[in-house]
Image (cartoon, helix red, strand yellow):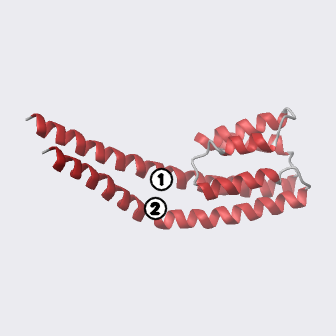
Amino acid sequence: MLRLFGCAMIFSGGAAAAALHARASLREVEVLGAMCHVLGCMESEIRLNRTPLPRLLLKLSLQSEGELRYFLQTVGKEAAGDRFTVALWRQACGQLPLGNYERGLMEELGDKLSGDEESLCRALHLTREQLLAAYDEHRRTRREKERRNAAVCLSASAFIMILLL
């Protein structure tokens, strides 16, 4: 009876690990899509209304949620107080649930935020296009990765159950 209970616990742990991987994958895709939207809004606001960056970041934070909202608020408040640095941008990017490639793109964007309007809009557009390509790729392959992760987690738990029996 005790072995059966242990097997059930191990199997439920494998299922929980698979569910956590799936949720993290979905969250990454959601944040990536929201970031693409935010960058598009930033580009149009700067180009059309010439909105200052600190005010724009705080405005966009009100329209966002979760980690993206925290990111925009953190960077926007620091920029409003004239304490904006590339290091702060990079540190805030590190808190976003993005992959290494996407995080690298966002960190590179921080290097270009201090330029003139035209170079800033060009950098926003280029980064948005690259993030959109990554977003499409993640969306397309997410289900396959989730199935693969679930198979690995459940197989590992089944292997451990076999060893225990």
Q: Quadrant of residue 85?
A: top right
Q: Residues within 10 Å of mark 2 (few under 14, many from 20)?
A: some
Among the two numbered marks 1 and 2 on one chain, the one whose residue lies closer to the N terminus = 1
Q: Which mark is residue 142?
A: 2
Is residue 146 toward the left or the right of residue 77 in the image? left
Label 1 sits on a secondary structure element that is helix
Q: Looking at the picture, which amino acid does disc 1 mark?
A: Leu
Label 2 sits on a secondary structure element that is helix
Q: Quadrant of residue 10?
A: top left
Q: Position of residue 41 (x, y in %)?
A: 74, 54
What residue is rendered at 72% in x and 51% in y?
Answer: 107
User: Visible in this render: residue 58?
Assistant: no
What residue is rendered at 37% in x and 57% in y?
Answer: 149
Do labels 1 and 2 touch, CB within 8 Å? yes
What residue is rendered at 29% in x and 47% in y?
Answer: 14
Q: Which mark is residue 161?
A: none
Q: Looking at the picture, which amino acid does disc 2 mark?
A: Arg
Residue ID for mark 1:
26
* Position of the N terminus by quadrant: top left
116 over 54 or under it: above or below: below
* Position of the C terminus by quadrant: top left
Is residue 164 toward the left or the right of residue 74 in the image? left
Q: Position of residue 62 (x, y in %)?
A: 68, 39
